[in-house]
Image (spheres, grey):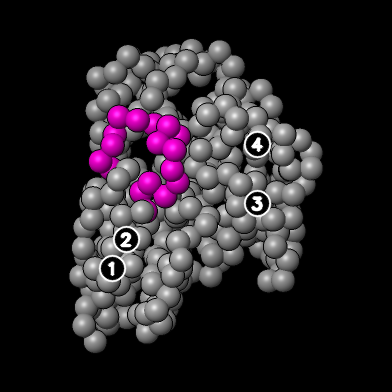
Amino acid sequence: MKSIRIGTRSSALALWQAREVARHLQNRNYLTEIVPIVSSGDKNLNQPLYSLGITGVFTRDLDVALLNDEIDIAVHSLKDVPTQLPQDIEIIAYLERDFPQDVLIRKESAQNKEFHELKLATSSLRRRAFWLKNYPNAEFSDIRGNIQTRLQKLEDGDFDATILSLAGIKRMKMDIDYEMLPLMIPAASQGVITVAGHSNKPEINEIVSQINHKKTQICVEIERNFLSTLEGGCTAPIGAYAEIIENQIRFKAALCSLDGKNCIATDENFEYNEVENFGEKFAKIVLENGGRELMNEIKNSY
């Protein structure tokens, strides 16, 4: 069989993720070739994502490459993948989740400041809302780009700290100080690398499905079903995290208003079965307890 063409964004982190997928496939004696593609989200680093008015900003160009048979599979950070996939594109594998958490990175001059004193650089509505829930007088600046770009902007900019995904820091083996943030619920499927394929390539999809991590799949499908039922893309302040603990699943999630003043949360422990759509079930509870009005308020604010 010829090499499996692995499409990826061209950032250092995205290339690392593509190499990780390649390693899993090579361990099963399959040949691979990595094909970098510049995405729309990487081309526009000046606007925050919520202002671009589209979902799938980091996946769209890889989708096109898949549909045009320029690549065989596409590797993504799962949190960037819309819950509604384009026609003929499907998720075929999830790698084992490593680090789902958000962490705080301070500049040297802000090392002694309390959390409520920090001026934060983040364009994530989720991170802003969860921070405002705890520190309502916080000030923010927008920041975009890969990890290295954000850290440079942190040093150069007029703000004290930024919030990043721990997964990116660990995968890049970056030697920087960070603080854990228990107040944050991660974005749905944060810390998970996923592989998408074309539905008309069953042979390749069958091969790639061999590297799927089933426990991760169970958890992220609950999170993404929760997100999908709330009708929230990456532009709504929604956190969702499921983890398997012994024979049960713990699911923590919240929908917050943009100013953080109104947060509707759920924290559930349950035994999993393949029949019930737990993400949808818990999202409906949130919607019935004020979430529907809150989602309308968020949508109308754009």
Q: Quadrant of residue 201?
A: bottom left
Q: Is residue 160 left or right of residue 287?
A: left
Which is the main secondary structure of the residues drawn in magenta?
loop
| Secondary structure under the numbered disc 1 in the rendered image | loop
Kindly report the distance in space between the C-alpha atoms of the residues bearing marks 3 and 2: 26 Å
Residue in the picture at 31% in, 55% down: 61
Kindly report the distance in space between the C-alpha atoms of the residues bearing marks 1 and 4: 36 Å
The residue at which mark 1 appears reads as 68
Residue 295 has which mark? 4
Q: Mark 3 vs mark 2: which is more N-terminal?
A: 2
Q: Quadrant of residue 25?
A: bottom left
Tell me which amino acid carries mark 3.
Answer: Thr
Please rate how many residues cluster around mark 3, counting C-alpha atoms within 10 Å: few if below 14, some from 14 to 19, many from 20. some
Tell me which amino acid carries mark 4.
Answer: Met
The residue at which mark 2 appears reads as 64
Please rate how many residues cluster around mark 2, counting C-alpha atoms within 10 Å: few if below 14, some from 14 to 19, many from 20. some
Q: Is residue 218 above or below residue 235?
A: below
x, y (%) of residue 126? Answer: 53, 34
Q: Mark 1 vs mark 4: which is more N-terminal?
A: 1
| Secondary structure under the numbered disc 2 in the rendered image | helix
Residue in the foreground of this view, choosing between 44 and 190 = 44
Residue in the foreground of this view, choosing between 182 and 289 = 289
x, y (%) of residue 239? Answer: 58, 42
Residue in the foreground of this view, choosing between 159 and 197 = 197
Of the 4 image quadrants, the one containing the N terminus is bottom left
Tell me which amino acid carries mark 1.
Answer: Asn
